Amino acid sequence: MLSNFNFHYQPRYINGEISSYEALLCSVGEPVDVQDFVISIKDTVSFDLLVIKRVLEDRAKYDCESKIRVAINISISSLIDKDFVTNCKAIFAVEQNIILELTNHDSCHHFDQIQAAIAELKTVDVCFALDDYGKGYVNSEMFIHLDVDYIKLDKKLISNIAQNYVAYSLVRTTYEKIANVLGKKVIVEGVETFEQLNLLKQFGQMEYQGFYFSNTLQAKQLEPTLGICNKQKKKKSLSLALDKAIYDINRAQNPIEIRAAIQKLTKVDHYNIVGVSPNSFDVYAEQQRINENYKEILENSNSAHFLLMSSLIRTCDAFVIIRDNKGNAIYNNEQHINYLNMDLVNVSVEEVCRVFPDYRTCLALDQELLNGNSCFIMSNETVETENGTSFFHTYRQKLMHFGQDFVICSVYKDENRISVDKLTGCFNKEYLESNEVKDHQKMVFVDLDGFKPINDHYGHNKGDEVLREFAFKMKSMLRESDIMIRFGGDEFILLFDSQLMDTVLKRMNKIRKNIEQHFADMNLQLSFSYGVSTLENGYKQALEMADKKMYQQKSERKQIA
């Protein structure tokens, strides 16, 4: 299963010293998309045990005393297999200094079983890390509460922090939640520049990995790692302590408990920031007064850091707007207001849509994000103005605050952007002439089946609506690196960076099944035929081959029908 693979090792650093190495699967010989290969594995238990065995064999060649701390990726679903846990327990009773990194969160929902497996393996001193936090897995927010030692931030969270204050603020908030509220250690991957490192260091202690520090190493290059205590010394935070004390006051159920909680608050609030009178006779009145004081502190917008944050967002190059899950704008910055000549805060959704009919598309994309598994989507959009067509990158981030979902949109104007199709939001076919095509390995030519009867029966307006819906649904099932192009009419092109043809075929069949079900739920019969080709000899040859295979498949599907 691993005959064509070996392992390279990515160092992690803390305070300038190597704390551990992450074992990374690499292909030998012919290039293979490792991510696609791992996703295609059906028997994750056997595969993960083999990976563990191979990594430990690597380490044993150069480290007989297990002084090299190594992190090994396993599928989180393997932990629900009792035989896997039993085997791991026997292995790690002998092999020490191991971190198991849990991947593929979206494939598993068995929280209690995973928690129990972690507890059992911790009896033989195994440490655990939750990998890919922030990548968009639907179960990440649940699994972050597992008894893991580390939460590993996905590299896409930090990729833009040196250019975008909103991105920086999101990472800072995430760090605060993990390190200071949950009390877990933070690992950040994908650190590639000094600017990223310098910004991250301001948050507090964490471990780093990325090409800024080191390229991947071979096993023979590994050295003994820094010994790190499993228990993390939690940072004492006055604001968190106050927040916890206020929480205890408000969950108290009788006057005695309230008085005790207020007295506890006096020990936390040495400077009487909130204004506590613990000897007050009327505990309920005191509880209300403390809450009012604390609310005033939280709402104080005159602090220097708040003013700086507000100024940065207000005057940054992007158009920034934040909407709640009903589409109401709760914030839009000056750039956004000036572009629309209208402040959308406190304006009803119906009124905004009346003034700007295209706004409904923005709300539809918000709902696509809120209802989907990802916490982030990017779209390329066009707006027709008096001066012609304007092109925009729009980045949507899903955030949750006190149980309510919000969407923060950052919109960047791009004068040099390759044009996109106004109806579907897909790139136009001129994209095929761009240099970006070289970043992809496979081309898929897609032609809709059943579109003409819909267009003829319901009319062109309905046809346009179906094309738009098809494009939105298709893009929701693609990866961030995938490209969707409207070639013309009801023909589309997809560009993938996958190396394995079988993986692309499996993805397309799964996508087609979901498309068919999506439109069946709308009482419409719509599907597609497709052809796949490789881009190694350029897009023209790939297009010719994919088109030929698509028509071949369409003919075969008609014969079956």
Image (cartoon, grey):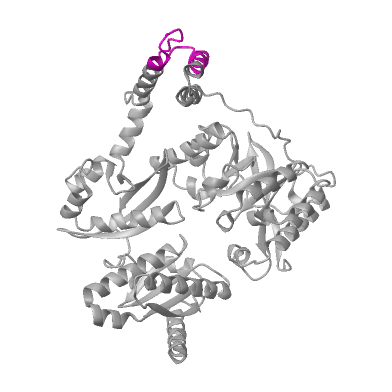
Q: Position of residue 435 (x, y in %)?
A: 42, 66
> Can the viewer see residue 301 in this picture?
yes
- The residue lying at 45 percent from left, 70 percent from top is 514
Nearest to the observer: residue 254 or residue 524: 254
Q: Position of residue 208 (x, y in %)?
A: 59, 41
Q: Is 284 placed above or below 324 here?
A: above
- The residue lying at 22 percent from left, 44 percent from top is 344
- The residue lying at 44 percent from left, 51 percent from top is 375
Nearest to the observer: residue 310 or residue 75: 75
Q: Position of residue 66 (x, y in %)?
A: 81, 44
> Can the viewer see residue 192 in this picture?
no
Nearest to the observer: residue 433 or residue 26: 26
Q: Is 84 placed above or below 332 here?
A: below
Residue 235: quadrant of the picture:
top right
Looking at the rendering, the stretch of residues picked out in magenta corresponds to 259-286
Assess whether residue 102 is covered by the magenta stretch.
no
Assess whether residue 285 is covered by the magenta stretch.
yes
Quarter of the image that includes the N terminus:
bottom right
Q: Is 310 placed above or below 210 here?
A: above
Residue 80: quadrant of the picture:
bottom right
Quarter of the image that includes the C terminus:
bottom left
